[in-house]
Image: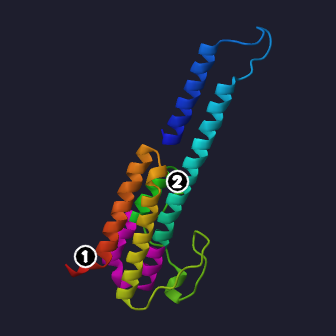
Amino acid sequence: MTTTGRRAVLVAGASAAAAALTGCTSDAGGPRRPSAAQEAAAREAERVARAEAALRRRAVSASRILLERYDTTLAAHPALHARVAPLRASVAAHAKALGEGGPTVSATPTPSAAATGAAAPTATGTPARAVPADPETALRELAAAARTASDAHTAELLAAPPEYARLLASVAAAGAAHAYLLTEGARA
């Protein structure tokens, strides 16, 4: 069960308990109106669920944008496949884990317009970013994109519920490791 689902169940349970403790305030034959506390609890549960859904959308979006960068880099520089493809597969797994039931993300790269130099729209609807012709420059830009995604996940930690915050922290740490492996790690 997702964090959102558990929170909704807990809030609903708390609302039901509050209703049982306050007793019935209407006629036995008339409809019961929710108390002010129940209405407030329901509004709070809805606000929490919306905020968490928005946080998840932002996290998945950051990972998918990075995934598209991996795809365009691999399409432009197939010789980098052995070095970049394992990291790309990891990013695909992160995007899937962060989405929990959202659209699936392929574990293999898909052809991209970057191979032809065109700037066709990507899966996120943004134009594909041109990949530098020099493989080392392309790797540095990919590392910068990994750092950007890592920073985005780190920035969301304080707003995330504990379980999702742990996942975000793990994905952010992996992004920082990817940035290192794409640049400095190759020199070691």
Image: magenta residue range? 69-90
Q: Amino acid at mark 2?
A: Arg
Q: Please provide percent x and percent y for residue 180.
A: 30, 73
Q: Which mark is residue 56?
A: 2
Residue 75 magenta-highlighted? yes
Whole-percent x and y of residue 66? 46, 70
**Would you call the spot at circle 2 few (<14 residues within 10 Å), some (14-19), or many (20 or more)?**
many
Q: Amino acid at mark 1?
A: Gly
Which residue is more in the foreground, 154 or 170? 154
Q: Earlier in the sequence, mark 1 or mark 2?
A: 2
Residue at the spot 39% in from the left edge and 69% down from the top edge: 88
Q: Which residue does the numbered mark 1 point to in the structure image?
A: 185
Residue 75 visible in this rendered orientation of the protein:
yes
| Front residue (pair 22, 104) | 22
Where disc 1 sits, the SS reads helix
Q: Which image quarter holds the C terminus?
A: bottom left
In the displayed structure, 88 sits above or below 21; it is below
- Looking at the image, is 107 positioned above or below residue 10? below
Viewer-closest of 114 and 126:
126
Residue 58: give x, y in percent of width and height: 54, 59
Secondary structure beneath disc 2? helix
